Amino acid sequence: MAWLGDFRSEVRENARVSDLVLILSVPIFLSLIFLLPESIQNSLILDYGNYSIVNLWSSAYVHRGFNHFSNNLAAYCVLIGPIYLLLVLADERKLFRYTFLSFLFILPFVIALSNIAALGSGTGAGFSGIGSAFFGLLPVSLFLFIHNKVSEEIEPAHGVVLFLIAAAIIAGTYSGVTAAAGILLFAVLITIYDTYQVGLDEVKEAAAGLTSMEGYFELVMIAGLLFLVSPVLLFPQDITQGDGAVNILSHYLGLLLGFFGPTIYLFYRRHRRQIIAGFQSGF
């Protein structure tokens, strides 16, 4: 029970009111937008063939009906807690804030412009692309926590194995068993390679250390399980929902950028001096 007491104490010590205000701003803002008159909400939806700079951003925060709104809101509320705790407990508050704000203010433009380029016509609305990015951030947060608190030999980039498992589930949904099996085989090979690089003894020691950390271990398991159920939630077999369709392109983009964006940044941050020196030596 000592670890559990440490966990609760560390959460209380590291949680900040300013962070909670930032986190709560999203459901408040989404709710306020949802309560606007329908005519105003319609003006915020993105028309792929006739768009404005405002619509490129605002379309991520307006929804088509209560179910659309409530599903996206619920997903955000479930995801943000583990992500925040993992990053704050890993002493990565600044990374949490910058990533959070990037998802809210930059990602909508990237997803909207990608939809325009790929689809060309139709309309887009909803927070699910950003929600997908938070799903992608889960394994990054998980492995960054392990790197900072359990074993420095385990890198955030090792979370690519979890990402590949999710990709295999998605492939199984849309492309069949063969594609899923191929991706899973690739994930197994990467796992073997990563274990060899880190060292089997180090992996065992890290696993033993993590399982002994009551409270922290459960948080890591919850984050991992949430990520592994993300393909089922984001990529349904039948993309037709009521009168519309699930925009799985936005979900793909969100998941990819939510995982690889922070992962690439962390790789750069860790090897910044070598990268800068390499660029300088080239000029």
Image (cartoon, rainbow, N blue to C red):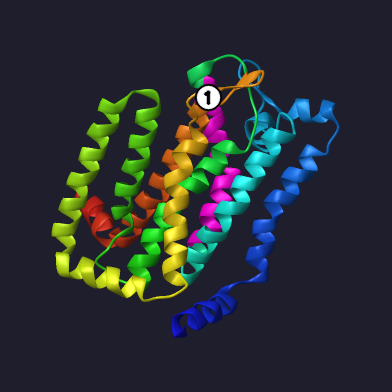
Question: Could you tell me residue 221's position as x and y percent?
Answer: 42, 60
Q: Residue at x 51, y 68 (%)?
A: 88
Q: Is residue 282 magenta?
A: no
Is 216 above or below relative to 197? below
Is 124 above or below relative to 155? above
Question: Could you tell me residue 72's position as x and y percent?
Answer: 63, 41
Q: Residue at x 22, y 68 (%)?
A: 204
Question: In which quarter of the view is residue 32 placed?
Answer: top right
Question: In which quarter of the view is residue 252 placed?
Answer: top left
Name the dominant secondary structure of the magenta segment.
helix
Looking at this view, is 87 or 72 the one in front?
72
Q: Residue at x 78, y 30 (%)?
A: 41
Is 251 above or below relative to 135? above
Image position of 103 (left or right of 41) = left
Answer whether residue 191 is visible to the viewer in this image: yes
Q: Secondary structure at mark 1?
A: helix
Read off the residue under disc 1.
115
Image position of 183 (left or right of 90) = left
How many numbered discs sit on the rendered protein?
Answer: 1
Q: Is residue 110 magenta?
A: yes
- The three-letter code of the residue at mark 1 reads Asn
Which residues, given as a range, are shown in magenta? 95-116
The single residue placed furthest to the bottom in the displayed view is 2
Question: Could you tell me residue 256's position as x and y percent?
Answer: 42, 39
Question: Could you tell me residue 222's position as x and y percent?
Answer: 47, 58
